[in-house]
Amino acid sequence: MSKFSQNAKVDSFLRSLNYWQTINLYTTLKQARMDISFEDAKLEAIENFGDSDILRYMLEEAINSPNPKHRTPTNKSLF
């Protein structure tokens, strides 16, 4: 699959989501990436709702990375 085709599919998927689906996807992806509470991730999702570039980046990272979770100072001891 070409990169253009993959990007078009991701963009199409993101455009198909309603407000709450977008918030829930952002919240879930944010929590998968780092050690953050549900409440903080949801608040960030609401604050960044209009910025589709952030959500697109997180989704593409989750789809294409074998381990998208990044180390943060609070979870270094887990590795």
Image (cartoon, grey):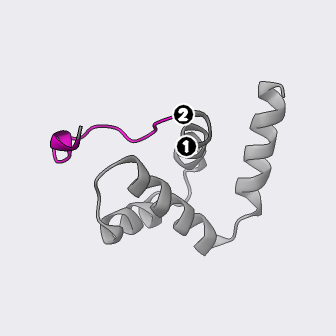
Res 45 quadrant in image: bottom left
Q: Nearer the viewer, residue 14 or 68?
A: 68
Residue 31 in the figure: left or right of residue 29: left
Residue 37 in the figure: left or right of residue 59: left
Q: Residue furthest top?
A: 2
Residue 6 image offset from top left, x and y in percent: 78, 35
Residue depicted at x 38% and y 61%: 44
Residue 65 in the figure: left or right of residue 17: left
How many numbered marks are there?
2
Q: Is residue 72 magenta?
A: yes
Residue depicted at x 56% and y 57%: 50
At label 2, the amino acid type is Ser
Label number found at residue 65 = 2
Q: Compared with residue 67, is residue 75 higher up or lower down, i.e. above or below?
A: below
Q: Secondary structure at mark 1?
A: helix
Q: Compared with residue 17, is residue 15 higher up or lower down, i.e. above or below?
A: above
Q: Is residue 37 magenta?
A: no
Query: Majority secondary structure of the magenta segment?
Result: loop
- Marks 2 and 1, how far apart at CA: 6 Å
Q: In the picture, which quadrant includes the C terminus? A: top left
Q: In the picture, which quadrant includes the N terminus? A: top right
Q: How many residues crowd around disc 2 within 10 Å: few (fewer than 14), some, or many (20 or more)?
A: few
Residue 58 image offset from top left, x and y in percent: 52, 44
At label 1, the amino acid type is Ala
Label number found at residue 62 = 1
Q: Nearer the viewer, residue 79 or 61?
A: 79
Q: Secondary structure at mark 2?
A: loop
Q: Are marks 2 and 1 in contact (CB under 8 Å)?
A: yes
Residue 71 image offset from top left, x and y in percent: 28, 37
Specify start and end residues of the magenta stretch as a single range: 66-78
Residue 59 image offset from top left, x and y in percent: 59, 46
Res 43 quadrant in image: bottom left
